[in-house]
Every structure is written in C-alpha cells, then in structure tokens.
Amino acid sequence: MKLYQTKVKLNATRGNQFHGERQRMTPEAAAEINAYRGALRLMERAAQAPSDAERQEMLRIRGKIGALLQAPKSWRSHALYSYETNASQRTNGLSYVFAAQSVKQISAQRELSALPARV
C-alpha cells in the first residue's frame, strides 16, 4: 500500500489525473439479481395487462434489485488505480469575421499505477 501511495504522489505533478477504486459484484448478489430479473421478465411478458397486485409486486422486485445494487456487501474491492488524461488539439486556418478552419484533436487515457486487492 505504501508503494502504491508513493507512486501516486510521484505521478501527481499535473492536474490531469484522477484516482478511483474498481469493484466487482459478488457471485451471490449477481445470482440473486438474475433471479429477480427473470421473475420480472416473466411478469412483463404476460399477454394481459398486469393487475394492481402484479404492478405492486413488480415495483417490489425492482426495489429489491436496487437495494442489492446499493448494498456494500454485494461488492468487493478489485483494485485502486491512478489514471492520466491527455489531449492534443491542432487548428489550421483563418479565423477573422468568418472561420475556415481544420481541427485535429486527440484524447487518450493511460493508467499510471494500479494496486490489486487481495481476496
């Protein structure tokens, strides 16, 4: 961890960097969400319009999916990272009253450092 923090501090010389954390969903949460989505699909594919009770059940299932997605236990840390964004632009042409220009622009990102999580 200290080595990662040192790398981040040494690379933090410009304002075009951002840092973050990658997370992955746990297999248990993914299986539960898939089951809820399957139930929703069955209810939505019914030939007739859903009754009020079915609509309430669909809303309850969507709420459960939302709660699972927001629950911290549904996610595990994968890595910390540090990225740099670079952009270059070149403009050729006249720009007086009317503009006749040719613009070439390139934007790219590169990973400066990453620290994988131990599982």
Image: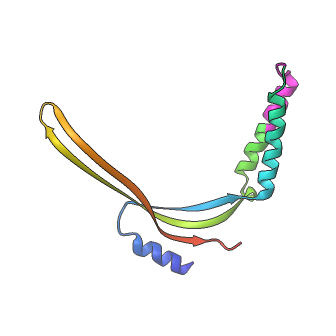
Vertical arrangement, residue 25 with respect to residue 111, above or below: above
Quadrant of the image containing the C terminus: bottom right
Nearest the viewer among 7 and 105 is 105
Magenta span has 41? no
Residue at (78% x, 53% y) in the render: 29
- Left or right of 84 in this view: 97: left
Vertical arrangement, residue 35 with respect to residue 50, above or below: below
Nearest the viewer among 70 and 31 is 31
Image coordinates of residue 95 in percent, x first then y, are: 15, 38
Vertical arrangement, residue 87 with respect to residue 111, above or below: above
- Left or right of 51 in this view: 26: left
Residue at (60% x, 67% y) in the render: 79
Q: Which residues are magenta?
A: 48-61
Quadrant of the image containing the N terminus: bottom right
Magenta portion: prevailing SS class: helix
Q: Quadrant of residue 85?
A: bottom left
Q: Quadrant of residue 50?
A: top right
Residue at (18% x, 45% y) in the render: 92
